[in-house]
Amino acid sequence: MQAPLFIGSEIYRGSSYGALHPLSIPRVPTVIDLSRAMGWLTQAQYINSPRARPAALTAFHTPRYIAALQAAETTGAVDADTRARHHLGTLSNPVFGEMFRRPATASGGSLLAATLLAQGGAVYNPGGGTHHGMADHAGGFCYLNDPVLAVKAFLAQRLTRVAYVDIDAHHCDGVAAAFHGEPRVLMISTHEARRWPFTGALEDRADGQAINLPLARGTNDSGFAMALNEVILPALQAMRPEAIVLQCGADAVTEDPLARLELSNNAHWATVAALHAMSPRFLVLGGGGYNPWTVGRLWAGVWATLNGHEIPARLPEPARAVLAALCWTRQPKVPGDHLLDTLRDTPRDGAIDQDLRHQIERLKARQKMWV
């Protein structure tokens, strides 16, 4: 079996949404540097991501929007009409120097991954996962929607059972809009309830093609494990997907500033391990995550999990140095020792919210009806 492949790019190292934006932090570079420091990322497994051409992006996005995005990068500004129509030049989606090239690179990576996976295997594109992008406008830090483009690429390969699983703290509204009612795609999302974009209610089935499970604030590893084992995995087992795309957003952990879930990174790694065994084609994407230490540790652990590498109790000095060199404009500017010395969080088990239990029972009953 071919070893998993890692798609990355140096464009993530040299670009930023701006000093005050939540995505001012280095994420993909930290994952690359940590994985190399651990000896987990060989040259043979690393692929430099191509930049998607505008024509490829129009598989989902409108030509007018792609042209507006390119023009905004070139001129460094947008007019009022462009801001209103395409949501560019906003606080969430600002104008910056690589605002087309960077998301086009993430999309190019996901499109390449779908091509590489035609014959099977696993590919990791941590720069991807931009699940809020809409066909004609940006949203939620997402200028383009690489998960949609990847799923469409799998469908173009004549696959008829593609599963999209999203464990980001924020609901995948862009993906849901793209595949509403699409019989070849099953969308499964766990996300924090009553958090932006305020979509993905339990009752929202996307015309029968979505399973949405909103998680209450404070949901811990025990609650997520119940969701994984009693909702996500049985749905995938029933579907027998030919390809799985996992959006592995890192903002559901306790330390993230933009969500209030209380998972450890063990929850994400358990999901990666379980889904890897359930389909011949497995694409893992990044997504949200706004604490530089927790994102780097979690996503490096995703790569270790895909490869079956043992995660040590304490990091060797080269890997620790990668984490120690990070800085953050938010507090705390200096993290606790556990965020520097280890990769694996202490499991965050505990009581399971009764509302979550009831929601899971409703979803299980609905699945029995489907069968």
Image (tube, helix red, strand yellow):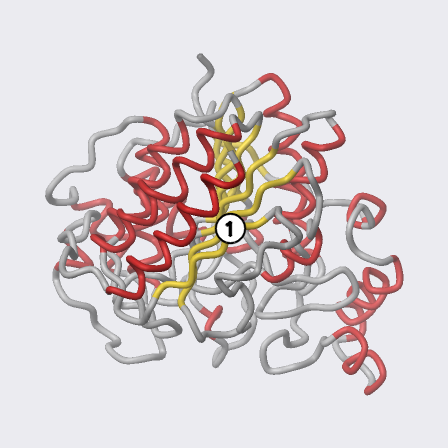
Residue 346, percent from left and from top? 13, 53
Tell me the quarter of the picture where residue 234 sits: top left
Label 1: which secondary element: strand
For badge 1, the amino acid type reads Ile
Horizontal side, residue 296 vs residue 65: left or right: left
Residue 144, percent from left and from top? 68, 58
Residue 96, percent from left and from top? 65, 72
Name of the residue lying farthest toward the top: 1
Looking at the image, how many numbered discs can be counted on the residues? 1
Horizontal side, residue 344 vs residue 140: left or right: left
Judging by the rendered image, the residue that carries numbered circle 1 is 211
Horizontal side, residue 320 vs residue 292: left or right: left
Residue 48, percent from left and from top? 58, 37
**Which of the two residues, 263 or 47, is positioned nearer the viewer here?**
263
Q: Which residue is painted at 39% across and 73% down in the image?
A: 258
Q: Which residue is painted at 76% across and 80% down in the image?
A: 77
Name of the residue lying farthest toward the front: 369
Tell me the quarter of the picture where residue 362 sits: bottom left
* The N terminus sits in image quarter: top left
Q: Which residue is painted at 26% across and 58% down in the image?
A: 263
